[in-house]
Amino acid sequence: MEVLHIPSGGFEINGVAYLASGVDTHPTPVICNGWLGNEKNLDLARAVQRAGWNAVTINYSGSWGSPGEFDFVQAPEDAAACVIA
């Protein structure tokens, strides 16, 4: 696992990269959680990792320790920032 700080909306939101083993290049999906719920889909991230892919999870602005204020409009921007980073 690797902790990520992803620039988005003037802040650096928190994320985690679940890295597949091996030195080869691995596909890397971004796994977005529901709107501020308890479920962060970490079980899905681990399953993707075990299947030989990387997986990235993010904490939207203003949620789960990421700076800023949560706004439904900002959440898609946070996800897009992760893809660009």
Image (spheres, rainbow, N blue to C red):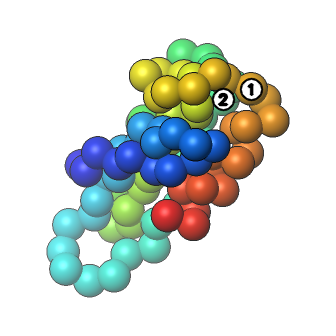
Seen in the image, is 5 located left or right of residue 1?
right
What is the three-letter code of the residue carrying label 2?
A: Gly
What residue is rendered at 73% in x and 37% in y? 74
Quarter occupied by residue 19: bottom left
Check disc 1 and report its element: helix, strand or loop.
Answer: loop
State the residue at coordinates (37%, 75%). Answer: 26
Instruction: Give percent across and percent down for residue 7.
Output: 50, 50
Which of the two residues, 35 or 82, is positioned nearer the viewer here?
82
Q: What residue would you read off at disc 1? A: 71
| Residue 43, placed above or below residue 55 | above
| Proximity of marks 1 and 2: CB atoms separated by less than 8 Å | no
Task: Depth check: give the residue in front, 55 or 50.
Answer: 55
Residue 71's spot in the image, x, y percent?
74, 26
Residue type, mark 1 in image:
Asp
Q: Which mark is residue 34?
A: 2
Q: How many marks?
A: 2
Earlier sequence position, callout 1 versus callout 2:
2
Q: CA distance from mark 1 to mark 2?
A: 13 Å
Residue 66 locus on image (x, y percent): 47, 28
Q: Is residue 47 visible?
A: no
